[in-house]
Amino acid sequence: MIPFKGRVQFKQYMPQKPHKWGVKAWDLADSQHSYIQYVDIYPGQNAIPQTHLGSYVVKRCLENSNLVAKGYHLYTDNFFTSPELFANLYENFGTYACGTVRYNRRGLPKDIMCKKPSGINLCGDMKFRQKGSLVASVWRDKKNVYTVSTIHDHSTSQVKRLNNNDGTFTRQNFECPKAVADYTCNMGGVDHADQYIQYYCYNHKTYKWRKRVFFVLMEMAKFNAFKLFLMSTNHQTNLTFLDFSISVGVG
């Protein structure tokens, strides 16, 4: 969300965000370095179809960033994830996908994708269902975690969780679907980029949305340049993002 409280037709209100009013931007970022591959400004509900909005955004980001049919792995949150989208990406876009999913999405196996699936009571309990390339799973953590993936099979991994044993808390290993473990490791690219951009973002007060969006896009470009600099072979390893920002400003 790009913070903005002035007048613009497609201004959004999202109460769960730190900045509740602003211009919505969809980001596609690399999971390893948080490099921002593509940014799409949401033009409002009157400009694009609202049915299957998540699928529309994902396909648009992949197509416009030239990442179709290159075998990439895509991780999405439960706003975007659906069996229909993931099957389409696998069959027509050459892209594998994994994400958390809302259990009431259409096309999910109802015996495990429900509020209280049978046999899922204790931390570490899990169940899988598969149809073609799609693998759905439910796993019990503090609450139920539902995932859909075309990357993973029924393989599992281990995670550490605090276990309360008569008032004594100890770290204990629990089995979980590998889809959950990989999702946790690879999902933070966009959030990491947003965090860096907010550190030294130019937030001069303006009533023109174009200026606000422009300055945020400039900060994204600076962040991408910083990441490319760190990936280069001759960079200074101790250079911070603040030092890099100052050097860009000084010229």
Image (cartoon, rainbow, N blue to C red):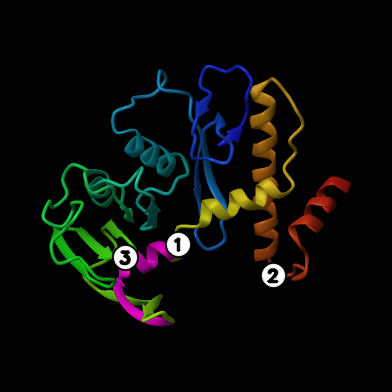
Judged left or right of residue 159, residue 128 is left
Q: Residue furthest front?
A: 166
Mark 1: few/some/many CA within 10 Å (<14, 14-19, 20+): some
Viewport quadrant of the N terminus = top right
> Picture coordinates of residue 250 (x, y %)?
88, 48
> Picture coordinates of residue 182 (x, y %)?
38, 66
The reply to whether callout 2 and callout 1 are in contact (CB within 8 Å) is no
Q: Secondary structure at mark 1?
A: helix
Please report whichever mark, 2 or 1, sits nearer to the chain's N-terminal start: 1
Q: Which residue is mark 2?
A: 233
Judged left or right of residue 205, residue 165 is left
Please report whichever mark, 3 or 2, sits nearer to the chain's N-terminal start: 3
Distance, label 3 to label 1, CA atoms, is 10 Å
Q: Residue furthest right?
A: 250
Residue 212 vertical placement versus 208 (above, below)? below
Please report whichever mark, 3 or 1, sits nearer to the chain's N-terminal start: 3
> Picture coordinates of residue 169 (x, y %)?
43, 80
> Picture coordinates of residue 49 (x, y %)?
34, 24
Q: Which residue is mark 1?
A: 186
Q: Secondary structure at mark 3?
A: helix
Q: Which residue is pictured at 41% across the width and 41% down the height?
A: 63
Residue 225 vertical placement versus 1 (above, below)? below
Distance, label 3 to label 2, CA atoms, is 33 Å
- Find residue 123 and report its image quarter: bottom left
Q: Which residue is pictured at 35% across the width and 51% down the height?
A: 69
Q: Which residue is pictured at 23% across the width and 71% down the height?
A: 125
Which numbered dot is residue 218?
none
Q: Which residues are magenta?
A: 170-184
Q: Is residue 251 visible?
A: no
Q: Which residue is mark 3?
A: 179
Instruction: Residue type at mark 2: give it.
Output: Thr
